[in-house]
Amino acid sequence: MDDKQKLWSRDFLIVTIINFFIYIVFYLLMATIASYTINNFNASTSIAGLASGIFIIGILFGRLGTGNIIEGIGSKKILIIGTLSYAIVSALYISAINIQLLILIRFLHGFAYGIASTATGTIVAQVIPISRRGEGIGYYSMSQILATALGPFLGIFLIRYVNFKVIFIITSFIAIMSFAISIFIRQPVSGETKNVRTSSGPERKFKVSNFIEGTAIPISILIMILGFNYSSILTFISLYSKELNLEKIASFFFIVYSIVVVFSRPISGRLLDAKGPNFVIYPCLLLFSIGLVVLSLTERGATFLLSAAIIGLGYGNFLSCGQAISIKNAPPNRLGLATATYYIFLDIGFGIGPYLFGSLISFMGYKGLYMFMAIVTLASIPLYLSLVRR
């Protein structure tokens, strides 16, 4: 295999590790911050959802300009700025003495995360060979999947044995590690990087195309809807499990989810490259809907974990395949914008979901909520047909 086809390069490994660190902080806090808000500030579930979801709104603002800035100064510098900011804000949680300050810190933390994660997504798109992009992003996104498992697992475990100050110290340390490692990555020198540095002044005028890549919008609309649905799981699964008297099982939900995705993503990535997106996307959407139905009907630990496995096959594989689709038709010098566009839409879904769900739970209940989300996911199949496949 020639050098151009090499997947497991030094920079690919480094950026994958960085991505793992920033995601594990994200998921650990997403799984615990609602409980922290309710327990420490006697907040309602809607306010707890706001404290959780405002992080995602911060991500949205962080991403909006990052894709454009990357074109000008390079992805490595943006990565260092993002991971340093992420580490600094991670340490501020200890100083949150009221709900208002906590919400502000959550927003700033999300802003820094948006910068860092857009940079990692851009760098990995630059260093993966085009012919192995579906496979490469599948492997890269496993760092996120492992974080999806370990983050909530650690969060739910730590809540039972230590106070939240210890949790915030742990997340701060992990964030500092992501910054330290980012220094050793090399600025990609591929054709796309060379092209972006030749951008002329007039191109920097304000216009929507400086922030959004149009070719990525169709698949991004779909991931916004699925992210909206998945945020209901990530934010409230610990509270739902408490209602079902399955608290000890709850932390294993994301472990099962992640194991399934780790073993299935390399296969879905290869199928995406070989058979095309339709061969993978339709089963993913159907499986995600079935998993939500099982979750809404569960009364026992076995079906609770079965829903995690089915959701992993559905949503977990769609997430990486959707990213590969989002950059497929983007010009080489706009890979950063295509990546940012995909995650901006995902962030909108993640940001709106927790606050809205926190309000709906009071009269719909957790079971009704997850059944409703299953219907919404099923309805996204004809939407994919009209938006993306065409």
Image (tube, grey):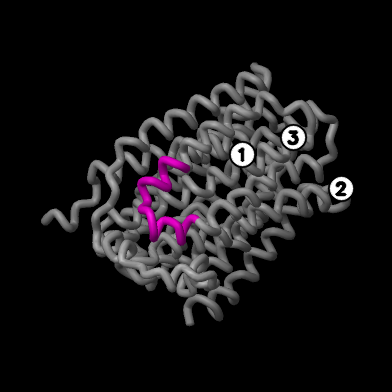
Q: Secondary structure at mark 1?
A: helix
Front of the two marks 2 and 1: 2
Corner quadrant of residue 221: bottom right
The residue tagged 1 is: 302
Is residue 68 a member of the stretch shown in magenta? Answer: yes
In the rendered view of the protein, which quadrant contains the N terminus? bottom left
Q: Which residue corresponds to the image point at 62% horizontal and 42% vertical from the top-left? A: 108
For the residues labelled 3 and 1, say whether their Cβ atoms are less than 8 Å apart. Answer: no
Find residue 162 and report its image quarter. top right
| Percent coordinates x, y for residue 157 in the rendering | 61, 24
Disc 2 target residue: 362
What's the distance in space between the residues labelled 2 and 3, CA to CA? Answer: 26 Å
Image coordinates of residue 352 in percent, x first then y, are 70, 55
Residue at far right of view: 363
Q: Residue at x 67, y 52 (%)?
A: 351
Label 2 to label 1: alpha-carbon separation? 27 Å
Which residue occupies 45% across, 47% down?
261
Q: Is residue 122 magenta?
A: no
Q: Earlier in the sequence, mark 2 or mark 1?
A: 1
Q: Which residue is mark 3?
A: 101
